Image (cartoon, coloured by chain):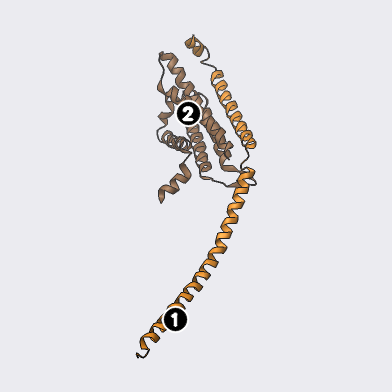
Chain colours: A orange, B brown
């Protein structure tokens, strides 16, 4: 039966046109479906926005504190150097103290 | 690293790249060897158009699809044109693959056993329609 059908439709491009139009219709439907699905799904939720905002706040905090940390570390190093110098002076004084 | 750049363009779109590049290659082959236009796969399309026109359409659609695949985030006005080019190119390609499948189906009916190309071209048609849907959805 299929053979007779294809032979009967041989001279006419009906089947080809029908298939082509069916695929074209399916393609247009797929595109519309894709557009509508995209509209329904929110790209980003409110909680995600909050989390993103909080993350940026933390990043800013870290950046500000990192500069302060460097400054404090420099001061701490300077104080330690002074302390070491003081210990050296003390050791020198004790070493050079006249022995009775 | 070159693979990183390659993955940036290809990952998630391998099917589209393969079909687009194949279209361009087949078009060039038909230009070089016009007798390829007499292949059974092109039977129904050749009844309507010449081999040169078929090759030109394949080259044009394949080339435009490649351009669409390269456009990541480019906009015309407020519209990202890359996904739309890919979606429309997929639909046009699906129509062509359906014609190829139909040609081979016609031959299969005549010789009373199926040709493997029928399955492949039918699945390519369905794949292209799904690509059209996902491309626009994820735009």
Q: Is residue A31 left or right of residue B124?
A: right
Residue pointed to by mark 2: B124
Image location (x, y in percent) of residue A82: 46, 79
The residue mark sitting in front, 2 or 1, is 1
Camera-nearest residue between A86 and A100: A100
Residue pointed to by mark 1: A86
Camera-nearest residue between A11 and B90: B90
Camera-nearest residue between A14 and A21: A21
Image location (x, y in percent) of residue A61: 58, 60
Figure check: B92 above or below A59: above
Image location (x, y in percent) of residue B137: 58, 36
Q: Are marks 2 and 1 on the same chain?
A: no
Figure check: A5 above or below A21: above
User: Quick one: label 1, few (<14), some, or many (20+) residues within 10 Å?
Assistant: few
* Residue name at image x 58 percent, y 23 percent: A22
Q: Quadrant of the C terminus of chain B?
A: top right
User: Quick one: label 2, few (<14), some, or many (20+) residues within 10 Å?
Assistant: some
Q: Is residue B97 left or right of residue B29?
A: right
> SS class of the residue under badge 1?
helix
Label number found at residue B58: none
């Amino acid at each position: 039966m299929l053979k007779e059908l294809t032979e009967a439709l041989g001279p006419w491009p009906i089947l080809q046109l029908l298939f082509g139009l069916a695929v074209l219709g399916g393609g247009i439907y797929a595109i519309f479906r894709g557009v509508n699905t995209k509209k329904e799904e929110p790209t980003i939720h409110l909680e995600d926005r909050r989390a993103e905002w909080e993350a940026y706040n933390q990043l800013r905090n870290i950046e500000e504190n990192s500069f302060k940390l460097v400054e404090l570390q420099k001061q701490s190093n300077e104080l330690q150097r002074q302390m070491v110098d003081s210990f050296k002076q003390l050791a020198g004084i004790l070493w050079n103290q006249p022995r009775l | 690293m070159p693979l990183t750049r390659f993955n940036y363009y290809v990952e998630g779109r391998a099917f589209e790249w393969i079909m687009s590049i194949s279209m361009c290659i087949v078009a060039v082959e038909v230009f070089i060897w016009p007798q390829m236009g007499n292949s059974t796969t092109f039977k129904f399309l050749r009844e309507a158009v010449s081999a040169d026109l078929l090759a030109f359409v394949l080259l044009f659609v394949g080339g435009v699809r490649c351009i669409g695949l390269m456009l990541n985030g480019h906009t015309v006005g407020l519209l990202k044109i890359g996904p739309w080019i890919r979606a429309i190119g997929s639909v046009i390609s699906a129509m062509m693959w359906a014609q190829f499948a139909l040609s081979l189906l016609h031959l299969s009916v005549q010789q009373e056993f199926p040709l493997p190309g029928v399955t492949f071209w039918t699945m390519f048609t369905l794949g292209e329609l799904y690509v059209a849907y996902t491309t626009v959805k994820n735009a």
